[in-house]
Image (tube, helix red, strand yellow):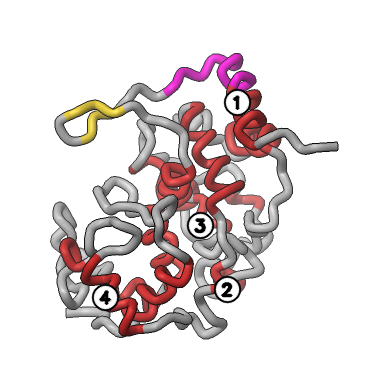
């Protein structure tokens, strides 16, 4: 039997969610104009990172209810809002216990989302109810965006990053992309400086998430943020642009040559 298009499935699921009485988030002003908030995989990718920096929702104060159910309750003793970040359980590589979070202080034992086979309606129900994101303040549009990201925005990072965490790209070409921009977006150097050590506008005084540091210590996070932007900032997202997977691998390879600290 032919599978219905994703857009139709999400539309039907949206009707079900709307029937439950959860209002949509009003449009939020960006710059001098108010732009309507629409569901998109790019928005979903930013929500996956840190939802309260994107959605019209407060930062959670309590630990996520599902956190206590993590298979490994000793390796990762974090509490509070960080436990509500999707990446906290499922990783920047989307593989959870089968990926970079298989060991170390971020280990939880939770499965990844890369291999999920949930349909659109099931996924929305899981996000809204099982994971508690509707109660946390996410709107129908936010939930749709997360669903779109999880069904259309995930990639197998192993295609770009090897087992030792090195980007498989051309450093020289990556430098050109860093200087000129990726996928028609603004250049990286404009905000991060030639050496990647320039704090972005509005950064805290103790900012040290420099380009080289993130790319070297957590290349999977670097790739995710290049693709979907930094929540709460004006960083452009490469996802949906003309940027290819090889472009991003090349950019990452160059970024790993940059200094990690001042």
| Real-space Cα separation, disc 3 to disc 4, in angstroms | 33 Å
Residue located 17% across and 35% down the image: 31
Percent position of residue 259, x then y: 24, 82
Of mark 1 and mark 4, the one earlier in the sequence is 1
Report the disc number at residue 88: 3
| Real-space Cα separation, disc 3 to disc 1, in angstroms | 29 Å
| Real-space Cα separation, disc 1 to disc 2, in angstroms | 32 Å
Mark 1 — residue? 11
> What range is drawn magenta here?
15-24
Q: With 180 as the anchor, is 147 left or right in this view?
A: right
Of circles 3 and 1, which is in front?
Answer: 1
Of mark 2 and mark 3, the one earlier in the sequence is 3
| Real-space Cα separation, disc 4 to disc 2, in angstroms | 23 Å
| Real-space Cα separation, disc 1 to disc 4, in angstroms | 41 Å
Is 123 or 148 nearer to us in this picture?
A: 148
Mark 2 — residue? 158
Residue 41: in magenta span: no
Q: Mark 1 and mark 4 in contact? Answer it, CB < 8 Å.
A: no
Of mark 4 and mark 2, the one earlier in the sequence is 2
Is 77 or 17 nearer to us in this picture?
A: 17
Q: Is residue 176 above or below residue 95?
A: below
Q: With 6 as the anchor, is 213 left or right in this view?
A: left
Secondary structure at numbered mark 4 = helix
Mark 4 — residue? 176
- Residue 210 sits in which quadrant? bottom left
């Amino acid at each position: 039997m032919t599978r219905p298009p994703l857009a139709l499935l999400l539309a039907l699921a949206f009707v079900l969610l709307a029937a439950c009485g959860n209002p949509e988030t009003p449009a939020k002003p960006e710059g001098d104009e108010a732009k309507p908030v629409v569901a998109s995989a790019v928005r979903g990718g930013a929500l996956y990172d840190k939802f309260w920096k994107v959605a019209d929702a407060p930062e959670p104060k309590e630990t996520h209810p599902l956190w206590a159910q993590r298979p490994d309750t000793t390796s990762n003793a974090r509490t509070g809002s960080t436990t509500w970040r999707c990446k906290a359980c499922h990783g920047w590589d989307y593989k959870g216990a089968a990926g970079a979070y298989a060991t170390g202080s971020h280990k939880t034992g939770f499965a990844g989302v890369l291999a999920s086979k949930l349909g659109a309606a099931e996924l929305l129900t899981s996000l809204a109810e099982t994971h508690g994101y509707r109660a946390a303040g996410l709107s129908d549009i936010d939930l749709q965006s997360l669903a779109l990201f999880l069904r259309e925005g995930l990639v197998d990072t192993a295609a770009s990053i090897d087992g030792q965490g090195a980007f498989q790209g051309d450093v020289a070409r990556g430098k050109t992309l860093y200087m000129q921009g990726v996928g028609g977006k603004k250049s990286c150097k404009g905000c991060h400086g030639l050496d990647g050590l320039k704090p972005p506008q509005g950064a805290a005084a103790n900012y040290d998430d420099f380009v080289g540091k993130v790319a070297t210590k957590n290349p999977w996070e670097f790739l995710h943020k290049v693709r979907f932007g930094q929540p709460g900032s004006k960083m452009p997202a490469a996802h949906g642009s003309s940027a290819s997977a090889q472009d991003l691998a090349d950019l990452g390879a160059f970024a790993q040559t940059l200094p990690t600290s001042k």
